[in-house]
Amino acid sequence: MIPGPEAIAKFIVLGSIWVMVLGGGVVAYYGYGLPDKVSFDVASERKPSIRVISIDGATLATYGNRYGTPVEVRNLPDYVGQAFVSIEDRRFYDHFGVDIVGILRATWANLSSGRLAEGGSTITQQLAKNLFLSPEKSFGRKIEEVLLAIWLEFKFDKQQILSLYLNRIYFGSGLYGIDAASRYYFGTDPRRLNLYDAAVLAGLPKAPSRYNPMVDPVKSAERANIVLDAMASTGALTNARAERAKQTRVRTARKADAGPGVRYFSDWVLDRVRDYVGYVDQDLLVHTTLDSRLQEIAEFNLERALESNGARAKNVTQGALLAMTPDGAVRAMVGGRDYFESQYNRVTQARRQPGSVFKLFVYLAGLDKSLGSNDWMRDVPITINGWEPRNFDRQHHGTMSIRDAVATSNNSIAVQMAMEVGLGTVVQKARDMGVSSPLTAEPSLALGTSEVSMLELTGAYAIVANGGFAVFPHAVSKIIGKGGEVLYQRSDEFPGRLMNPLHAGEMNNMLSAVIAKGTGRNAIIDRPAAGKTGTTSDYRDAWFIGYTSDLVAGVWVGNDNGSPMDEVTGGGLPATLWHDFMLHAHQNIPVRSLGKAALARSKKVGEDESWRDFTKGFSASSKKE
């Protein structure tokens, strides 16, 4: 039976009433507790800022948010507000907080393209979300956003809403508000922004990191040019003026002080700030030991090595590099090939098998037992509880000096040495030298089968490099509070001696031979140097750690998932990368790289006869080979 007109009308009326009731209920539910007021000034809401700077004054990273002085759009050049309206919400002056036309247009564009190509949020909705809501995406949150947008339109006029938006929006680099962004990126008061710079800033809210002019000035310029086209399409500019204003690259008032690779270092520093000053309730300026020039060299050389055809062909996907002074002040740290892809720090967090790099502790334990570099041992097949250590070339070479055994990274002699002095003694020597990772006292320990960190290993080699003094790898030299108060200052206390300086000299003599005539020949540079190669089973890890009188550096390459590389040894890619970094690092190396403690130590031990023996042996051994 077909319902009559009266029944249809009744159904429509009842349906409408229920829609109104349910709609009113939803509005009442989500609209309860709408705020009474909104402040233009957000500086009081911000969290403390921590700025990390290098030893040469470069800003490495800033944590926390930076806000500028609140500004009103009526005090800015007309094209500033027009730029944001044109690209973000061209019907801003025509809608009531929610743009129905814009939503329909975005919906059609998304359906036509088969993907989420456009959004329908207005500037008012973005402001409502920024002011009051969490990033959560849900139906309820969207209703709240719409209601808040309508409420904002009721409470404020369009100019006030746009002003609030400009003072609250995120512009990348930890910057909130157009005043902070204008001063940071372009070094100018927002009231004096030129047209193009205004377009650059207007292009940032969509993707602040991607279009950051200090990270990618070309991509930022492309986005700014889109903003100019949008301004022309809305009539804010003529087409001719928009074309004249376009550029191919954004020029900022400052350049990025450091590449993204330095974030491995600055994140590591940030984790330690609270240990030094406790709860952070004020802005801090953290002075570090990092040298921005050496950091740039480290990042460049690691990237070049990993991007080379040889690395790709040999299945090398990751790497890390650490450089420090002989007293442990970190000068450069690159914890991986791409910080944005992975924040996992392969210098400080990763534990990998060190291979023959670990033999340092075996031979130092031997030196403590009165064995010397010129003593002789036999490279012969040995079996320990069914395990037979083999040399890299699968051959045995008979009687050879310990110095030559180190130079050629002989496995048989290293295991014999470890068993002779005692595995417990080797473990204790590693502990004394700063290795805190778990170590298993088994024969294969001599060949580096227990996992350790690059930070630990490089610090241990620094002890040999400085003649036997204790080393605590460090990065923070001073922390200053908001009022200029020094909250932390690293002590310049003279460290204790960990080893007999003659043993340090002997070890240096042996490690010099590694570079001069052994497995590390690819690391030869234009000055005396010493170091050790390391390669693990199935070529899963390859290392080179070495030093000069000024700098100690460690290099690791491998794959995060532990998959084998294609016959990559420590004497290959790592030694070559170490060579390239150290060669560039020592060109016009500044005195500051030594640090106060190192200079004081040099002066003190320069008068020590044993230190003169050590440095004499260093130079002689390098020149001799």
Image (spheres, grey):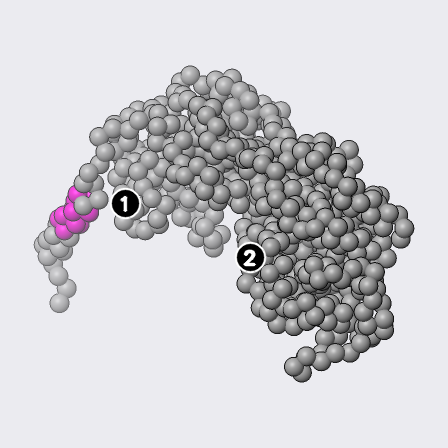
Q: Is residue 24 magenta?
A: yes
- Residue at 55% across / 22% down in the picture? 187
Mark sitting on residue 143: 1
Range drawn in magenta = 17-28
Residue 380 position, x and y percent, is 80, 76
- Residue at 17% across / 43% down in the picture? 28
Q: Which residue was labeled with disc 2?
A: 436
Instruction: Judge from the rendering whether residue 158 lies leftward or rightward of residue 316; answer left or right.
Output: left
Quarter of the image with the N terminus in it: bottom left
Mark sitting on residue 7: none
Q: Are marks 1 and 2 in contact (CB under 8 Å)?
A: no
Q: Residues within 10 Å of mark 1 (few under 14, many from 20)?
A: some
Q: Residues within 10 Å of mark 2 (few under 14, many from 20)?
A: few
Q: What's under tag 2, amino acid-wise?
A: Ser
- Residue at 38% across / 27% down in the picture? 43
- Residue at 72% across / 75% down in the picture? 389
